[in-house]
Amino acid sequence: MFGYVNVYKPELKMKDFYKYNAYYCGLCKTLKDKYGCFGQMTLSYDMTFLILLLTSLYESETRKLQNRCLVHPVKKHDTLVNEITDYVADMNIALTYHHLRDDWQDEKSIAAFAGSGLLKGAYQKIALAYPRQCKVIQESLQKLQECEKAGESNLDLVSRCFGELMSELFVYRVDPWEESLRKMGFYLGKYIYILDAYDDIEKDRKHGSYNPLLSECDQEGFDEKCRRILTMMMAECSREFEKLPCLLDIDILHNILYDGVWTKFDQIQKERIQRKEHDNDNKSV
């Protein structure tokens, strides 16, 4: 995943920040316990948000553990785990497996080939346990691959592929909350895809890689246009969130949805503006 869905620490109470980290550490521990060190390397903030959301919605019974790890080798730290942690860890591995397969097929990356081989057995078990989610992951990434190969410039069409993928992951159970969770995942998925494309503009231009934003990234008002699009995505996502009866960790969830998701965008935009000003200064000289 991408790490764009994170907390905004300056606006978060310390007790909530520690709790958020405990969920993050819980996902890290679960990935390592179930899938080894390679599985642990797939850890992301984006999926930690999904744990918080589903735990709050379903009020899952959560266990608090004390653990040491490579990052915290001396002092034990809090770790929160529950059934949602297991589900999200499995979805993380499924996403990583298909991503590595795509990299092998597209770029003939030996590392991707080796990585997908390491995860193949684990993925087959996950696919048996969660056929609905794994089917949509595979189909959505295939659609996305086809769009990229065709050089598709329609941002809505391309980002929809990742939106549909995230939509399915958010539906942990088929129940009365399915519709809102599905819509929430859809718009958050589109947000993540568009922000990732925005983040990768210079890198993709340099390497000649596909990016649906490249054709208009030098136009006047481009950065603000991207902000407006992303704002619309998060407005729809947040609207669906407010329909859910989430009370547990509500301050953390609000922090992520209304502040945290903008941290990376603000950083990228600031760097783009500074780069443009630097280029303009060089031209004037």
Image (spheres, grey):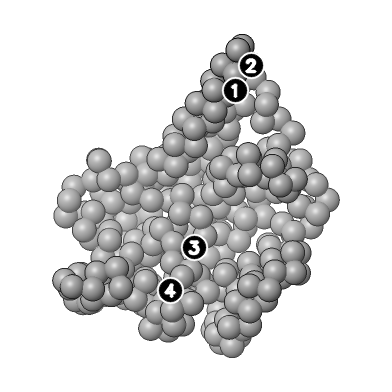
Q: Position of residue 112 (x, y in %)?
A: 64, 72
Q: Is residue 155 above or below residue 178?
A: above
| Disc on the earlier residue, 3 or 1 | 3
Mark closer to the chain start, 4 or 2: 4
Q: Residue at x 18, y 47 (%)?
A: 13
Kindly identify the residue that appears in the image at 47 percent across and 76 percent down. 39
Residue at screen point 74% across, 33% down: 215
> Residue 66: horizontal and vertical position, in percent?
19, 76
| Marks 3/1: CA–CA distance | 43 Å
Q: Which residue is mark 2?
A: 283
Q: Residues within 10 Å of mark 1 (few under 14, many from 20)?
A: few
Q: CA distance from mark 1 to mark 4?
A: 40 Å
Q: Amino acid at mark 3?
A: Phe
Which circle, 1 or 4, is nearer the viewer? 1
In the structure shown, which secondary structural element does the residue marked by tag 2 occupy? helix
Q: Are marks 2 and 1 in contact (CB under 8 Å)?
A: yes
CA gap, disc 4 to disc 2? Answer: 46 Å
Answer with mark 3 or mark 4, whichever residue precedes in sequence.
4
- The amino acid type of the residue labelled 1 equals Asp
In-image side of 191 versus 49 (left or right)? right
Dot 1: what SS?
A: helix
Write down the residue under mark 1. 279
Badge 4 amino acid: Gln
Q: Nearer the viewer, residue 160 or 174?
A: 160
Q: Is residue 76 left or right of residue 272?
A: left
Residue identified by numbered label 3: 170
Mark 3 vs mark 1, foreground winner is 1
